[in-house]
Amino acid sequence: MPEAKSAKNRLHLDIGVPDRSEFEELVVERGGSKVDEQDQPDFPVWSVLADPEGNEFCVYEREDPAA
C-alpha cells in the first residue's frame, strides 16, 4: 500500500518458529525491529516484530512449526 501505516495492519500473521530469539535477531539484522513481547496465561510467550516498513507480525516458539 502506498499510504503509511496509521492503524492496525490489514492482515496479521502469527508465525511459529523453532527458536524465537534467533528469528528476532534475523528480523533485526534485515532491517526490522522488535516492538513488544507478550506473556499471557495459556499462551506461549510471543514477540511482536515489524518489518522495515512497519508491518507488524507475531512470532512464538513452537517445537514443530509445520504442525
Image (cartoon, rainbow, N blue to C red):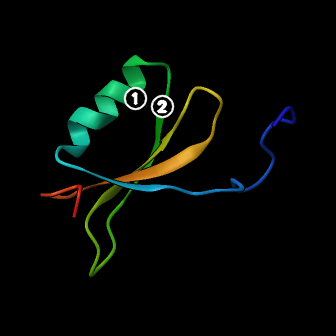
Q: What is the C-alpha distance between the residues marked 1 and 2? A: 7 Å
Report whether 6 appears left or right of 43.
right
Give the residue pinned by disc 1. Answer: 27
How many numbered tags mark residues here? 2
Is the residue marked by circle 2 packed among few (<14), some (14-19), or many (20+) residues within 10 Å? many
Placement of 2 over or under 19, stated as above or below: above
Give the residue pinned by disc 2. Answer: 33
Which is nearer the eye, 64 or 22? Answer: 64
Residue at image coords 49%, 19%:
31
Q: Secondary structure at mark 1?
A: helix
Report whether 27 appears left or right of 7.
left
Residue extending furthest toward the bottom: 42
Residue at image coords 77%, 54%:
7
| Quadrant (top left/top right/bottom left/bottom right) for the C terminus | bottom left
Q: Position of residue 25 (x, y in %)?
A: 30, 28
Q: Position of residue 16 (x, y in %)?
A: 29, 55
Q: Position of residue 61 (x, y in %)?
A: 22, 55
Q: Secondary structure at mark 2?
A: strand
